[in-house]
Amino acid sequence: MHHAGHASRPRPVFARRSLHGIGATLATLLAALLGLAGAIPAAAGAAVAADHRPAHPEHDWMGSTVAAHEGRVAGTTSTTRKQTPGFDVSNWQGTVNWTSAYTKGGRFAYIKATEGTTYKDPKFNANYTNSYKAGFIRGAYHFATPNSSGGKAQADYFVAHGGGWSKDGKTLPPMLDIEYNPYGASCYGLSHSAMVSWISAFIKEVHTKTKRWATIYTSSGWWTSCTGNSKTFASNDPLFVARYATTAGTLPAGWPFYTFWQYADKGTLPGDQDYFNGSTTQLKNLANNT
């Protein structure tokens, strides 16, 4: 009985081996944690870099955020002077029949070229060329994302990827589309002064590169909320106001009239429905900067 009881006692060597195994396991865990700690900054850096690339630029176009924030008012548009019909398009609208659009009365178009500093609209080249061939006076626009990079950087990217200008009677001033943020906070996290500075940097760089003051597309609601209703740009930059209603309504501060008005997001012409505030002769004068 004595020997049997002695034989049943655990042997110390097992205890020593168990401790050794625990030590090895802890060492492995520590190494893994150290490796993970080293990887965290790299992963975070990758996430930050990814933030500079718009998540869904193919879904963003002139007015894509306006109706959700400001609504629509049904009815027949009312204007006080002759208006020239036109429209604006992007990749979102698919393939455009430009000849048909001209037959239906369209005479000008703004076409999305870029967004941020990484996206060029895949339909831009075809739209820009085919609109010209069909007889349209057309221009390029940039969808701004002021929280992703500076105004100057985005202007440079825009001009390099379709946002240029030539005095051929068929090319409208380059345009900045500045509206509600489709990715988050409406004003992109910028204060009134910071937003005005961003827009100013974009406008000045476009002017430096093209010798044209850019058209500014916006809504009165966004402009008031996000720039404090700044008058900074009214003396140089044509206004393209967005308001889906029977009149253009109260304009952003400083502009006594609109040059363009986006009055509906669907209609007879492809894409959004727009007016130029004047005759086709005046439209051509704007294109020629005369």
Image (spheres, helix red, strand yellow):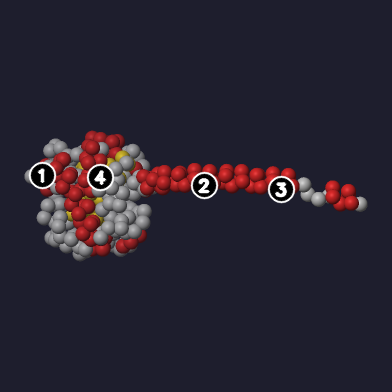
Left or right: residue 239 compared with residue 12:
left
**What residue is disc 1 on?**
289
Say the numbered circle drawn on residue 83.
none
Earlier-in-chain disc, 4 versus 1: 4
Judged from the image, the secondary structure of the residue bearing numbered disc 2 is: helix
Residue marked by disc 2: 33
Q: Secondary structure at mark 4?
A: helix
Q: Looking at this view, name the residue that lies furthest to the right.
A: 1
- Amino acid type at circle 2 is Leu
Left or right side of 89 for 10? right
Reading the image, the residue beneath label 4 is: 154
Front position among marks 1 and 2 = 2
Q: CA distance from mark 4 to mark 3?
A: 67 Å
* Label located before the other in sequence (4 or 2): 2
How many marks do you count on the picture?
4
State the separation of the CA atoms marked 1 and 2: 64 Å
Callout 1 crowding tier (Cα within 10 Å): few <14, some 14–19, many ≥20: some
- The alpha-carbon separation of the residues under discs 4 and 2 comes to 40 Å
* Circle 3 crowding by C-alpha within 10 Å: few under 14, some 14–19, many from 20: few
Mark in front: 1 vs 3: 3
Q: Which residue is mark 3?
A: 15
Q: Residue at x 14, y 44 (%)?
A: 207
Between marks 4 and 1, how big is the CA–CA gap? 24 Å
Residue 191 drawn above or below residue 50: below
User: For the point 36% across and 53% down, which residue is it?
Assistant: 183
Structural crowding at the residue carrying mark 2, measured as other residues with C-alpha within 10 Å and reported as few (<14), some (14–19) or many (≥20): few
Q: Secondary structure at mark 1?
A: loop
